[in-house]
């Protein structure tokens, strides 16, 4: 979970969510194991690489679900026939954006970042990547607001806040830019 440390590799923010390791000298970006799939980086959040000629963002295994990149953090499921985790395209749930990581929209008037179902956990938006747990009563992955852990900003994905003077996780803009450039090409 290099979320707390936001280290740089080769002078660039790498965004390796678990251990910040490299695989064969490259940042693989696989949230759980950093493996390669068929010799390619399956989670190139920074560089927007492709799988079988299509943008691929399935965080666990890099698979496609029904020929689409659904970006579901756990199993790539759909919810009511729609992608619940459309990090790239900001799809809607009941007419509202439940996962607008790029735009920071709200759900039912409250900031909402529960990656799978858009729920709140103990009345708070905790944004826990796997189970929405808390650590010592605090939000461990507050993606929207960069809440703090032991008095330090942990995961300011939207605003690229800093940890020890270095950019920690300004990944959203890189994702947006990378795929915008890809689509334009």
Image: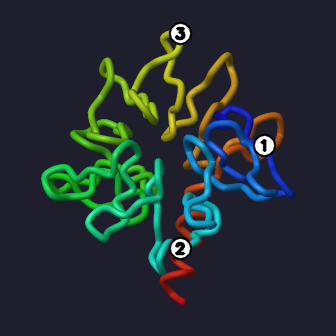
Q: Position of residue 180 (x, y in %)?
A: 52, 77
Residue visible at 17% across and 57% down?
95
Whether label 1 touches label 2, CB < 8 Å: no
Reading the image, the residue beneath label 3 is 136
Task: Give the quadrant of the N terminus.
Answer: top right
Whether label 2 touches label 3, CB < 8 Å: no
Lower position in the chain sequence, tag 1 or tag 2: 1
Q: Is 14 positioned to the left or the right of 51 in the image? A: right
Q: Single out the mark in the foreground, 1 or 2.
A: 2
Badge 2: few (under 14), some or many (20 or more) residues near its Cα, within 10 Å? some
Q: Is 26 positioned to the left or the right of 114 in the image? A: right
CA separation, marks 1 and 2?
25 Å
Lower position in the chain sequence, tag 2 or tag 3: 2
Vertical arrangement, residue 147 with respect to residue 114, above or below: above
Q: Position of residue 134 (x, y in %)?
A: 46, 18
Task: Give the quadrant of the C terminus.
Answer: bottom right
Vertical arrangement, residue 13 with respect to residue 74, above or below: below
- Disc 1 is placed on an element classified as loop
Examine the rendering and report whether any part of residue 48 can be seen: yes
| Numbered circle sitting on residue 154 | none
Figure quadrant of residue 82: bottom left
Q: Position of residue 58 (x, y in %)?
A: 43, 56
Reading the image, the residue beneath label 2 is 50
28 or 117, which is in the foreground? 28
């Amino acid at each position: 979970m290099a979320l707390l440390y936001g280290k740089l590799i080769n002078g660039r923010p790498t965004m390796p969510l678990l251990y910040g390791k490299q695989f064969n000298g490259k940042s693989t970006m696989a949230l759980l194991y950093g493996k390669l799939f068929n010799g390619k980086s399956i989670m190139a959040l920074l560089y927007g690489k492709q799988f079988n000629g299509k943008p691929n963002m399935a965080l666990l295994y890099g698979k496609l679900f029904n020929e689409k990149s659904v970006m579901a953090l756990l199993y790539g499921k759909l919810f009511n026939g729609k992608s619940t985790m459309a990090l790239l395209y900001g799809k809607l749930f009941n007419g509202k954006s439940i996962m607008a990581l790029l735009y920071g929209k709200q759900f039912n008037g409250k900031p909402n970042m529960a990656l799978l179902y858009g729920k709140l956990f103990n009345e708070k938006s905790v944004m826990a990547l796997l189970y929405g747990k808390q650590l010592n009563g605090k939000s461990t992955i507050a993606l929207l607001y960069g809440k703090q852990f032991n008095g330090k900003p942990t995961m300011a994905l939207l605003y690229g806040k800093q940890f020890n003077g270095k950019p920690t996780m300004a990944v959203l803009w890189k994702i947006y830019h990378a795929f915008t450039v890809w689509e334009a090409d």
